[in-house]
Image (cartoon, rainbow, N blue to C red):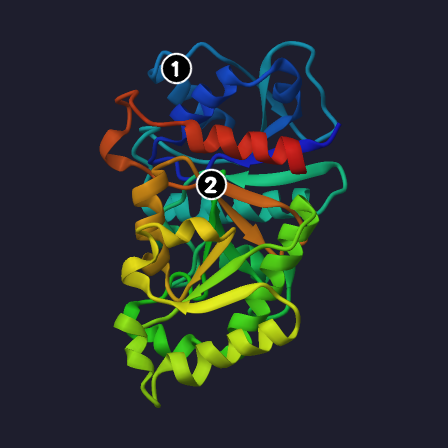
């Protein structure tokens, strides 16, 4: 029975709430597979403060088992006073330790995959990166072969650039990067769904810059599309961003955008929280809920746990 690793994520968040709610919805057999990487004392106090009836078990490794319905915690030490208001510097060190441990555990053949609950990006060690880029660096994979995929039941979307400021997007788009990432997408899709995906690639500029000579569409995006088609990929584009999500998005399995909000904003408008974040190209399967830390609703017991539950189901099925 392969194990599912869940990083409890940012303490100043709704993470403990969605962990509890998801835990109550899964089967006892799936519960046995789950190991939380996080602070035992923190989760114990957060659950107690929220009046959540759940048994916790402090374990040291993936070999430990539990006959009872207990949530197993691989403990990472965290010093705190208020369990829902931990100092940022302390949390930053804690998150680093959690991700490092979860990465090492995920390299084991005993592990089906890794889920990380939401983390404020300010807590990560480098600017302008997310967990996608951090784990890609730890896996030492070839540059530009990692892919952030936001996946719903019927559609997946991938940004070519991820957590960059808008002013830096254009200079970080190249034919080679687009081609490398589409290779990763197709390989992943064929592995899990046993078929070649239909892939749509968006342009960058309004109206694709009317295909002007010096535009990114003409210099980088169209050459990438032509090369991919010559290699046998089922790729179309450049698609016009302002009308694609009216109805034409339904013609594709995967849509590739040039930057984060260009592709994620319309996608989330359609699918809300019915999606998960999957990192492609790593040495293991990694997913995360498709939402943030929810600081405005901490302790209100109103958080939507469906995305974390979908993450667990996904790894349980494909891991």
Examine the rendered structure and indicate whether residue 176 appears above or below residue 87.
below
* Rendered location of residue 312, percent (x, y): 56, 31
- In the rendered view, tell whether residue 300 sits above or below residue 173: above
Vertical placement of residue 75 versus 148, above or below = above
* Mark seen at residue 48: 1
Closer to the camera: disc 2 or disc 1? 2
| SS for dot 1 | helix
- State which quadrant residue 293 falls in: top left
Specify few, some or many for label 1: CA neighbours under 10 Å numbering under 14, 14-19, or 20 or more: few
Chain-order first, disc 2 or disc 1: 1
Camera-side residue: 58 or 102? 102
Give the residue at x 38% y 22%.
46
Q: Residue at x 37, y 33 (%)?
A: 80
Percent coordinates x, y for residue 5 in the rendering? 60, 35
Residue tagged 2: 152
The N terminus - image quarter: top right
Q: Position of residue 227 (x, y in %)?
A: 58, 78
Q: Nearer the viewer, residue 13 or 194?
A: 194
Give residue 47's quadrant in the image: top left
Q: Is residue 68 above or below residue 226?
A: above
Mark 2 neighbour class, 10 Å CA radius: few under 14, some 14 to 19, many 20 or more = some
- Let me know if residue 138 appears in the view: no
């Amino acid at each position: 029975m392969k194990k599912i690793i869940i990083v409890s994520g940012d303490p100043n968040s709704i993470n403990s709430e969605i962990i509890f709610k998801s835990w109550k919805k899964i089967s006892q057999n799936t519960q046995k597979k789950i190991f939380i990487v996080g602070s035992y004392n923190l989760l114990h106090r957060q659950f107690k403060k929220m009046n959540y009836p759940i048994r916790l078990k402090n374990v040291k490794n993936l070999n430990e088992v539990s006959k009872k319905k207990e949530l197993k915690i691989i403990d990472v030490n965290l010093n705190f006073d208020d369990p829902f208001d931990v100092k940022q510097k302390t949390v930053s060190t804690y998150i680093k330790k959690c991700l490092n441990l979860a990465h090492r555990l995920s390299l084991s053949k005993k592990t089906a995959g890794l889920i990380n609950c939401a983390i404020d990006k300010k807590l990560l060690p480098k600017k302008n990166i997310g967990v996608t880029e951090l784990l890609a660096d730890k896996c030492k994979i070839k540059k530009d072969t990692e892919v952030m995929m936001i996946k719903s039941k019927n559609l997946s979307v991938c940004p070519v650039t991820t957590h960059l400021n808008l002013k830096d997007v254009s200079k970080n788009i190249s034919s080679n990067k687009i081609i490398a990432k589409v290779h990763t997408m197709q390989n992943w899709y064929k592995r899990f769904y046993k078929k070649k995906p239909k892939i749509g690639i968006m342009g960058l500029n309004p109206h694709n810059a009317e295909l002007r000579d010096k535009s990114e569409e003409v210099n980088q995006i169209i050459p990438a599309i032509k090369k991919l088609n010559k290699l046998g990929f089922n790729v179309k584009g450049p698609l016009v961003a302002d009308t694609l999500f009216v109805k034409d998005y339904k013609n594709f399995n995967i849509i590739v955008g040039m930057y984060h909000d260009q592709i994620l904003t319309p996608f989330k408008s359609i699918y809300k929280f019915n999606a998960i974040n999957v990192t492609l190209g790593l040495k293991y399967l990694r997913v995360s809920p498709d939402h943030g830390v929810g600081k405005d609703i901490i302790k209100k017991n109103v958080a939507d746990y469906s995305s974390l539950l979908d993450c667990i189901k996904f790894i349980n099925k494909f891991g």
